[in-house]
Image: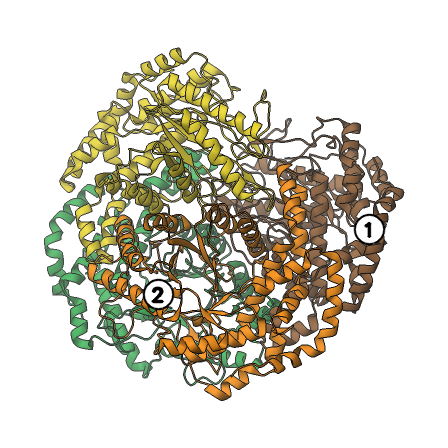
Chain colours: A brown, B yellow, C orange, D green
Amino acid sequence: MRINNDQIKASNKELLDVHKEDLVQLAKKHKNLEQIIDTIAKYNIAIPSWALGAGGTRFGRFGFGGEPGNLEQKLDDVAVINDLTGSANAVSLHIPWDIPGNAEAIKAKAHLLGLNFDAMNSNTFQDQQDQEHSYKFGSLCHTDKVVRDQAVAHNKEVIDQGVALGSKSLTVWLADGSNFPGQLNFRRAFENTLASLKEIYAYLPADWKMFIEYKPYEPNFYSMVIQDWGTSHMLAKDLGEKAFTLVDLGHHLPNTNIEQIVATLVTKGMLGGFHFNDSKYGDDDLSVGVIKPYQLFLIFNELVYGFDNNKANNPIPAWMIDASHNLKDPLEDLIQSVEAIETAYAKALLIDQKALEKAQLANDVVASQRILQDAFQSDVKIILAEARLRNGAALDPIEAYRKMDVRKELINERGMNNAATGL
Amino acid sequence: MRINNDQIKASNKELLDVHKEDLVQLAKKHKNLEQIIDTIAKYNIAIPSWALGAGGTRFGRFGFGGEPGNLEQKLDDVAVINDLTGSANAVSLHIPWDIPGNAEAIKAKAHLLGLNFDAMNSNTFQDQQDQEHSYKFGSLCHTDKVVRDQAVAHNKEVIDQGVALGSKSLTVWLADGSNFPGQLNFRRAFENTLASLKEIYAYLPADWKMFIEYKPYEPNFYSMVIQDWGTSHMLAKDLGEKAFTLVDLGHHLPNTNIEQIVATLVTKGMLGGFHFNDSKYGDDDLSVGVIKPYQLFLIFNELVYGFDNNKANNPIPAWMIDASHNLKDPLEDLIQSVEAIETAYAKALLIDQKALEKAQLANDVVASQRILQDAFQSDVKIILAEARLRNGAALDPIEAYRKMDVRKELINERGMNNAATGL
Amino acid sequence: MRINNDQIKASNKELLDVHKEDLVQLAKKHKNLEQIIDTIAKYNIAIPSWALGAGGTRFGRFGFGGEPGNLEQKLDDVAVINDLTGSANAVSLHIPWDIPGNAEAIKAKAHLLGLNFDAMNSNTFQDQQDQEHSYKFGSLCHTDKVVRDQAVAHNKEVIDQGVALGSKSLTVWLADGSNFPGQLNFRRAFENTLASLKEIYAYLPADWKMFIEYKPYEPNFYSMVIQDWGTSHMLAKDLGEKAFTLVDLGHHLPNTNIEQIVATLVTKGMLGGFHFNDSKYGDDDLSVGVIKPYQLFLIFNELVYGFDNNKANNPIPAWMIDASHNLKDPLEDLIQSVEAIETAYAKALLIDQKALEKAQLANDVVASQRILQDAFQSDVKIILAEARLRNGAALDPIEAYRKMDVRKELINERGMNNAATGL
Amino acid sequence: MRINNDQIKASNKELLDVHKEDLVQLAKKHKNLEQIIDTIAKYNIAIPSWALGAGGTRFGRFGFGGEPGNLEQKLDDVAVINDLTGSANAVSLHIPWDIPGNAEAIKAKAHLLGLNFDAMNSNTFQDQQDQEHSYKFGSLCHTDKVVRDQAVAHNKEVIDQGVALGSKSLTVWLADGSNFPGQLNFRRAFENTLASLKEIYAYLPADWKMFIEYKPYEPNFYSMVIQDWGTSHMLAKDLGEKAFTLVDLGHHLPNTNIEQIVATLVTKGMLGGFHFNDSKYGDDDLSVGVIKPYQLFLIFNELVYGFDNNKANNPIPAWMIDASHNLKDPLEDLIQSVEAIETAYAKALLIDQKALEKAQLANDVVASQRILQDAFQSDVKIILAEARLRNGAALDPIEAYRKMDVRKELINERGMNNAATGL
């Protein structure tokens, strides 16, 4: 299914008058409103292909009906999100969950839908049916060279597929690690991983980037080979200038000051991208902004400041959602995540950076706090709505999605028992 | 397969002389050695039926070959552990993973193997194939009474099955909770859970106990209905004197002082039992004692003291392992867990409680610490070995298991692709 | 010094027109706006006497000048906060930091300033100069009865002083615990504490309440006698119906779901009061709302719902700030804290509870989240300003405070080197 | 006071026969026992001068009597520890707490006592009486250059004093950070810190090293400029080959895998040294090994392996204790810490590294775990005692210390109310 302009317009009709009036009122408050609306309107977040179906936990998986059964249908779903939000014009693929049978056809379809291909994701944390060697004891870090070679070869294939689709980057996330003290020699694991990454890096096209994800733990684990940003950064420096660190918000120990990590990476030009999600306890992969919206805002404050003062030439990061949907309709969840990211971004754009700098240099702590809080406490719903309107999208995407009965339509098309590939 | 006495004796033969000499040396050091050996020799830990097969994570499951395919075979496996360690004469069943077709026959078989049935475990955290209502949004706490009724009925069936097997207790663990703020009304969920538990409690036979497990979080969750021992204790008090709190070592927030919780529960006569395991980050279900052996020792210190001074008539707790085995042979892992528990127990028995009390009353902190550390730093391998010897078990169970090629034998019997029921 | 009406009016003058226009706009959006403004206008938070001076860390203490040197001056400072915010008409005293020389005179002065006396706080976590026995090894839990007796006597004196001032409650917070495993017998400590509390409880006047605070750890500690809400609740139940649990937001292990604890306590009618503050790592005593404003909002959601549905007859909780001010002017900090609490409260009042209940009963997770988020993302600055205006307070209290040069005035009055009693 | 040989011999007399017999028995078990005893006998840990007096918390400080009142007396105290343990021949000074009036005389006295000077520690986290600019808002990171210059100058003076004493390294620990979001510009703070460190680094003598400590948080803080090893490592790389990362065991977020950090730093030749202590919740500065002795053992496993396979030419790390003593006699506490470190080291030396490597390469997880656990569960008290004996020290240092009534003697010499400089 495809959402057409008339549907959008119809859904906006009732809300439009009030919205316009609200906008007039808001413009009185903020001198740079136009610029903020424009920035938000141009902003896009990549949708991960694996988040379009129901996620699972170790206890089970509850399907939603109408899940996309192949890559074409996944693109259709991303297009739905993009049509409604005007801010999701890219998809991030995961191989082998989304091997394009015919890359040219897929590329053409994406083009038609107004979508492009963001970072490619390799997968050496699961064994595939026909796989020769198991990743039970690791992949790029494995003690056995044949396993490492297999994992390196897989990453090269992912690059090949990405090249065919027009992607420009590879994200490497590893579940390599150990469950018990003693199982793994940390140094050997680190060195094997570095050597494997070097082979993959050497295969990268000239205009590609490599993003190295880090994570302190998985359930049941005792150690992870790339446990923190420090390790990721060390590997990236050893690889070369196309390698960067990728920050997944859920991949941190309790209480980590993530906004400072982001600031440090931008300072050094080493921030490659984001996996947005939220969490209360561990890597919960909840919808963005549902637990710690203020932390997300503080991160965007660092980004706004960082790219206004980009002395180290940090490239524009890859913006991706990485969440899992056990209870919600995945499309509704992704729409809520897109909105939450843009909410944080818009609020960060409201920060009076000059006043903040002045207060900081004067060590006026009360004023500094107030400047941040004033921006955070502002209601930016109208800004987001206007940005969507200008992109031809829905003033209220969730409402529109429900009124259009999109899920029912998808179930009609695809049936109740389709299951999307992914976790 | 069954391990026979001759095999055990043969495996002990080589080690026996050195062991006997070591024992003589050790006896010189500890006046109460005989008593400690005796206590350890009589101690038994229940093996959970669901830990006899390979566990899984969200990324996959790596089979071991020779996994038990039915309840009879699970009993055989527990018998192997018990034959080798002399300390695992009970099994804890999980319904519906282990529904006994013929309870009488199962009971007879268990009797023959020298095993009995510890606490029964119900399961309302997974949907079963033929289940009418889904537990997607909870079970005992569900907003819809028909779902709660179904979950209550299941628990009653579990009691029935336990009665038929001679079990005397029911452990209730719930994955009821929510993924997002707002999803659940905490109070309604608590009250529904309490009402449901009351129905189950009313069904308990007179000589049964109910153990209420608590847990702060599951992956992907925002809240759990029974999030901590305080909530479990509140529910148990509301239910009546057959209800107790069960402590799973992995079910705590970072840095929790678990030994103090244990002491508090014993003080009030409310400690129902344990699920032993270990963890570094969350509920990792690793083999007992692999991460925090000193914490385990401190817990056993509370238990030794607590039951030597059992003023509140706390019943002897149910001792169970609750671990998951993704990388190790499950039988080897369980043997290592049994050893780790007995190691902590034997060390706690070495504590000079009188000297400790004296130092505590004098606020001699240095001496108090030293008394605990002296016991903990002692090597109790010989004590465990002697206790096993007296039980007709193996001096070195892991070594014996490997020499006897048990796993190979099990694969021969059951094949490579048998998969045990469980997570 | 005292802030007079004319000063307030002058400070409001410039802001008034815009405010009035904003209010008109806002009224279009919210049908129940008047009711919310009214609720906020009537809401008051107690100011802790110990937060009026500069706080300290183990590294030092940076004075602000003009700190209050005695209880009279502390009342003056609270009056400043109350005059500016219209929401701080009570003070919570800490004995022996604030022993009133002449209770009648103090009471009269407070009355004149429009202030009353909220919960009294005892202190057995510090040794006072003339104290016979040291609390080095605990107070109410101490192994030695003479120390416990001294601590009990101190609490009784605090009650006496509270009675003289018109207070109606006692908050007990203990730093009792241990630094090393083995130092303390958990059970003896618990039982000693309970026995000591019983003596204090017996001394409570008929119309008084006792609030029992809990805390998992202090720096350098291994255990705390009252480590969590479960222990506090157990003690309160053992004491009687005048005993309640007090929640200090900073007194929790990482990732604790505090809003659920609040809901559970309200469910059982056991919530006595709050110590508001915020923290990123431990008990950081930062200004309210600076780190986790969404968590604070979720707590207020439980309170709004809880007291709209107060089936267990929970008394209205004592609302207190408990923060420490190392870098900010304490009065500015407290004003920011008052505003943050009211912000969370006003947002919680905006939640459409009927719609939320409907969504919850239908397990419509997306809608539930949206209802909460809509309320949280709303800008309530105008509501707070209007509530202040109706109370004769300042539209922008921080701005007014700075324009009136209050701190300068206080320094003129009291000098630069006055140091308030407290930590 | 000074402990003489005869006192040591007298204290050992009673224990000697049993010890000798135990040693004979132990030698039968371990082929490489002699080598392990030798390694332990040669091992030395530096005592921090600030740990010789009673530590304090924000609630107070409990003196012990006989505390050292000046640097000379501190050296005497270290000599007591060294005489009793034979493993503490160095002291780590903290400026300005220990400014040597006459460096030559101090050096001569130390020489006489058999002591030398380990890393010097600067202090810009406290304001000194006569200090021109306050560190209230930071030191090396301060927004104001005059403050940074003052802090840099202080570090240079510390180097000068270290040179005069024969020290060869400077440890920089900063409490620079912020209490509130917005207070600090992370990037400016990082860049100011780096620039300041560069000035200090440039002043280092050719044969000196600089150790950069990291820490995620202080009580009351929101951010620390050097929050983790990754930041410390980044700074060290920017400074040059004399700069290294120093690991304080208490300076980590909950659940951090510290042993892996140690392994990573050794792999890259970047591990500068250790501050040993233990903690349950935060930076508790408890005596070494009282909470997580197994973690300490795992760290020593990395060190033993790391320096047996020192491919990156990591220099031998500086070994220091950094603990605080609120309840114990500081000398007893330090003796217990020295013992705990040596216990972990001796156990790590017992690991069969060849067998471990074999098991790791075969992914035999059960065997790997068993090899570590076998070593850890071994009793090494006799090894430590024998190492001490060979160094002319006490078989049981705590017992000897108490029998010799050292504290009483110190009180006689120095009085009850002496207070050592330090926190």
Amino acid at circle 2: Ser
Amino acid type, mark 1? Leu
Q: Is residue D219 above or below residue B107?
A: below
In front of the other: B383 or C79: C79
Q: Are marks 2 and 1 on the same chain?
A: no
Q: Tell me the tag on residue A15.
A: 1
Q: Residues within 10 Å of mark 1 (few under 14, many from 20)?
A: few
Query: Is residue D262 shown left or right of residue A327?
Result: left
**Does residue A321 appear left or right of residue B326 in this picture?**
right
Q: Is residue D330 visible?
A: yes
Residue B414 percent location from the top left of the image: 47, 15
As displayed, is residue B225 above or below residue A127? below
Lateral position of residue C276 relative to residue A272, left or right: left
Circle 2 marks a residue in which chain?
A: C
**Residue to which mark 2 is pinned:** C122
Q: How crowded is the residue under tag 2: few (<14 C-alpha within 10 Å), some, or many (20+)? A: many
The x, y position of residue A291, in whole percent, is 59, 51
User: Which of the pair D359/B85 is nearer the observer?
Assistant: B85
Q: Nearer the viewer, residue C119 or C276?
A: C119
Q: Which mark is residue C216?
A: none
**Residue B99: x, y in percent?**
47, 18
Check disc 2 and report its element: helix, strand or loop.
loop
Q: Residue D275, located in which quarter of the rendered image?
A: bottom left
Quadrant that contains the N terminus of chain A: top right
Instruction: Tell me where residue D3 appears, x and y as whole percent.
Output: 17, 68
Using the numbered discs, state the Cα–Cα distance from disc 2 to disc 1 in whole angstroms.
Answer: 57 Å
Viewer-nearest residue: A371 or C400? C400
Residue shown at the point (35%, 60%) measured from the top left: C174
Considering the image in quadrants, where does the C terminus of chain A appear? top right
Chain of residue at mark 1: A
